[in-house]
Image (cartoon, grey):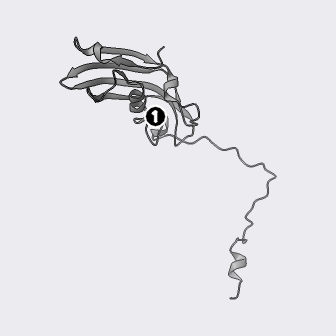
Amino acid sequence: MQSKLMFTQEAIERGPLLLSGELDPQVFELDEAPDIRPASPLRYELRVEKRGQQILVRGQVEAEMELECARSGLFYSTIVEESAFLRDYSIPDSPHEIDLTEELRESVLLNVPAYPVSPEARSDDFRLPELPSRPQDAEDPEEPGSSPWDSLDNLNL
């Protein structure tokens, strides 16, 4: 599995270049992220072509990610994609060899939802897991007729 996606300008001189494959999930650099994990390689299907003084790259980029649900706190799996990936590079300003790795990584990560909610948590009958009940011998913090505000009510200022 590749860790970089690169092509040279000579590769597109004879016509469009079709690129498809997978990049290692390590390209996401998410080892320290507590709420997101890559569950699959980054997959891409791209067409690279020369248009005048521009290099046009378009296609689709996707990866399966495990995200922490903002409602339940549980991880769920979803596909994060950019179906209309489009980048252009100026031929005079571009290096001889063009690296698309960072562009692909960024396009997937920018499409991760800011507030991820699992499909189960979206349903109308979703309930958070029950918390364990208090032990029977635990004291009740509020006694009838007693309030934390009672002592303030009796103050004479």
Q: Please, which residue is most extreme toward the top here?
A: 14
Q: Please, which residue is most extreme toward the bottom here?
A: 157
* Image coords of residue 14 (percent x, y): 22, 11
Residue depicted at 71% across the width and 47% down the height:
133
Which residue type does callout 1 highlight?
Answer: Pro
Residue depicted at 35% across the width and 17% down the height:
7
Q: Badge 1, how many Cα within 10 Å: few under 14, some, many 20+?
A: few
Disc 1 marks which residue? 119
Q: Is residue 22 above or below residue 114?
A: above
Whether residue 96 is visible to the viewer of this picture, yes or no, is: yes
Q: Please, which residue is most extreme toward the right here?
A: 137
Secondary structure at numbered mark 1: helix
Quarter of the image holding residue 4? top left
The one nearer the camera, 14 or 2, is 14
* Image coords of residue 17 (percent x, y): 28, 14
Quarter of the image holding residue 89? top left
The one nearer the camera, 91 or 63, is 91
State which quarter of the image contains the C terminus. bottom right
Residue depicted at 52% across the width and 38% down the height:
69
Quarter of the image holding residue 37? top right
